[in-house]
Image: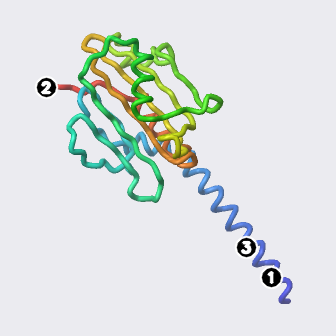
Amino acid sequence: MAANFGLAMEWLVFFVLMGLGIYTMRVIKNEKNTYIKNARIVVFKNFKLYTPSWWTQIDEANADEISFKRTDTRYDWEARFMWNTSPSEKDIQELFIDKIHQRRILFDEENSVIHNPSDFREKELIASGKYEMLRLEGTATADRAERLYYDAFLIREIESGHYLYAESKSSILNGLVEGPYFEEVMLRLELAELS
């Protein structure tokens, strides 16, 4: 009788774990739709950012910068958006490389992806002809010591030369968690209605 009870408990635990696994898969599958449905709109300079509701905006002393963290978990992750009004005569790729070097980021060549301006031409913001965009993402080393997952966008207003540099920085594993949402925020970027 005790053996049957033990076997029944093992099966019960097995089915409970299977049920939790299926529930978790459904939650993850629907997370993207949940993010879009519950997104908070944050207006920063010329742009409207659709941020996940679980991102917490961190107060910055600089009006040309905003950042977000997750305060509901212990994830080592941060997204930062920096507006620069110093126009540069450099090609957007050279400017982007300079910004990455200033941030002291060294990408792993074999685990990085470069997205060229042509990759974004279908996006409404870029299709307007007023902005150009570049992106670089992958594993990297910061300050020659810290291993991280780094995702960066540079969006430049063609007429003025002003640009937005946006970065998502995290430990390598946490980049897989918040990275897709940072990408969605950047790809859904819209011009704000400025009065």
Quadrant into which the C terminus falls: top left
Structural distance between the alpha carbons of marks 3 and 1: 10 Å
Q: Which corner quadrant of the image does residue 1 belong to?
A: bottom right
Q: Amino acid at mark 3?
A: Leu
Q: Looking at this rendering, what residue extends furthest in the front direction?
A: 144
Structural distance between the alpha carbons of marks 2 and 1: 70 Å
Circle 2: element type: loop
Disc 3 and disc 2 in contact, CB within 8 angstroms: no
User: Does 92 appear above or below 35?
Assistant: above
**Lower position in the chain sequence, tag 2 or tag 1:** 1
Circle 1: element type: helix
Dot in front, 3 or 2: 2
Q: Position of residue 164 (x, y in %)?
A: 33, 27
User: Does 17 appear above or below 1?
Assistant: above
Near mark 3 (Cα within 10 A), the count class, few <14, some 14-19 or many ≥20, is: few
Q: Position of residue 134 (x, y in %)?
A: 45, 21
Q: Amino acid at mark 1?
A: Gly
Residue at position x 30%, y 39% from top?
41
Q: Looking at this rendering, what residue extends furthest in the bottom direction?
A: 1
Examine the rendering and report whether any part of residue 30 can be seen.
no
Q: Which residue is mark 2?
A: 195
Circle 3: element type: helix
Lateral position of residue 5 relative to residue 19, left or right: right
Q: Nearer the viewer, residue 12 or 180?
A: 180
Q: Position of residue 115 (x, y in %)?
A: 52, 21
**Lower position in the chain sequence, tag 3 or tag 1:** 1
Lateral position of residue 128 relative to residue 76, left or right: left
Q: Which corner quadrant of the image does residue 48 belong to?
A: top left
Q: Which residue is mark 3?
A: 12
Q: Which residue is mark 1?
A: 6
Residue at position x 41%, y 46% from top?
78
